[in-house]
Amino acid sequence: MRTQDIDAEWQALLAARDGGAASAADARGQPDARSGVRGRTVAPLMAHDAAAPTIARNGAEPSLGPRDCPQATQSARDLAWVPGTLSDLFGPILAPPVAQDGCRVAGRLCQTLDGRIATACGSSQWIGGPGDILHTHRLRALCHAVIVGAGTVAADDPRLTTREVCGPNPTRIILDPTGRLPVTHQVFTEGPPTILVTCVGDATHHGSARVLRLPAPLDLPLLLTRLAAMNLTRIFVEGGGITVSRFLAAGCLDRLHVTIAPVILGSGIPAFTLPQASRIGDGLRASFRVFPMDPDILLDMPLDRARPTLCR
Ligand SMILES: NC(=O)c1ccc[n+]([C@@H]2O[C@H](COP(=O)([O-])OP(=O)(O)OC[C@H]3O[C@@H](n4cnc5c(N)ncnc54)[C@H](OP(=O)(O)O)[C@@H]3O)[C@@H](O)[C@H]2O)c1
């Protein structure tokens, strides 16, 4: 019964992906009914939160119909799911864009307790538990496009597909301004549509990827405008640290999800890299909700395009 329920809730989110509002808050055009509540532990993975707006309570029915999703059902057992959790967490991701560029942008990282996303030699598998992998695939499925930086493609050779969940694959966007990635990477040889964003060369394709050439230095607001023109308006910035940090510094993130794993590395690639701050006030202090995701925790932060004081 429980896995059927979580599958139904997920199907409703997928239906909202391309259509109706995902929650009462979204229907009102608000990114999150709880924006501005700092440090609230929602604990939705442990107890039913009656206040949470959900698709089911909003009356929208899943439109995709029954689907054979053995992997999703299996993965769902990894989460201590209670009704409303998924729509509470992902509803704000599905909210309509409010920024002038026409996009709604969610960033995500999984970091150690000491703020590392990989070892110094680039190994990041796996900092988080199975729940974080599932969470990442869900974000891919709900968004039109997934963005990663050249460093992530070079280190991980990822596929960026939704193989852990039911749902469509997003268009893959690779940021490689200097054209350093060889054509042999999986994103350029197989799988869903891919766009290589670069500032060099004159090729129209890189392997199977289309090339989008933009002026140097790469201007993220311009990139978002160009993606919106392609009807790619719900954008998931999956990593790595430099890429998410650049979106943060440019004030281009509506939402930030950070999974924190109880791991201390003491070295490695940093999650966030920003201009050097001399005062604590130079940084960005965000409100957040906590979603326990055993053995990790997930922080959901409504940034609403805010940026660190230092980057303004
Ligand atoms: N734990 C996690 O959540 C997670 C997620 C993803 C990746 N990772 C790991 O993180 C590591 C890679 O992360 P990373 O921070 O080193 O690199 P990254 O963010 O993946 O890629 C950074 C590179 O992408 C290009 N780039 C991205 N945004 C740009 C912008 N706005 N303007 C210009 N260039 C831009 C630049 O390429 P150029 O250097 O060519 O200019 C930049 O150096 C890998 O080890 C991977 O395994 C971890």
Image (spheres, helix red, strand yellow):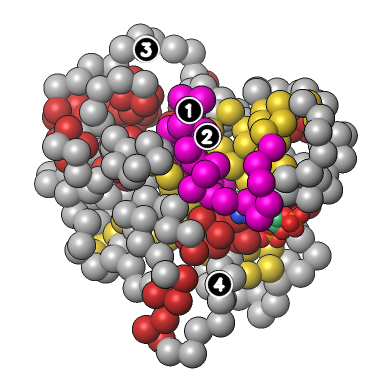
Q: CA distance from mark 2 to mark 4?
A: 25 Å
**Callout 2 amino acid:** Arg
Q: Which residue is mark 1?
A: 229
Give how far across and how far down residue 74 sits, in percent: 50, 30
Q: Nearer the viewer, mark 2 or mark 4?
A: 2
Q: Badge 3: how crowded within 10 Å, few (<14), some, or many (20+)?
A: few
Q: Is label 4 in a helix, a strand or a loop?
A: loop
> Quarter containing ligand 1?
bottom right
Q: Is label 2's Cβ within 8 Å of ligand 1?
A: no
Residue that badge 2 annotates? 226
Does the magenta run of residues contain 120?
Answer: no
How far separated are the C-alphas under marks 4 and 1? 29 Å
Q: Earlier in the sequence, mark 3 or mark 1?
A: 3
Question: Measuring 60% from the left and 75% from the top, which residue is drawn there?
Answer: 264
Q: Quickly name the residue at label 3.
A: 64
Q: Is residue 60 left or right of residue 96?
A: left
**Mark 4 or mark 1, which has the lower sequence index?**
1
Distance in Å between CA atoms under marks 3 and 2 = 30 Å
- Using the image, tell me which numbered label, if any, was put on residue 274: 4
Tell me: is circle 3 under 8 Å from ligand 1. Answer: no
The quadrant of the image that shows the C terminus is bottom left
Residue under the point 25% across and 22% down: 20
Q: Are marks 3 and 2 in contact (CB under 8 Å)?
A: no
Q: Amino acid at mark 3?
A: Leu
Q: Nearer the viewer, residue 236 or 138?
A: 236
The magenta region covers 213-238
- For the residues bearing labels 1 and 2, Cβ distance under 8 angstroms: yes
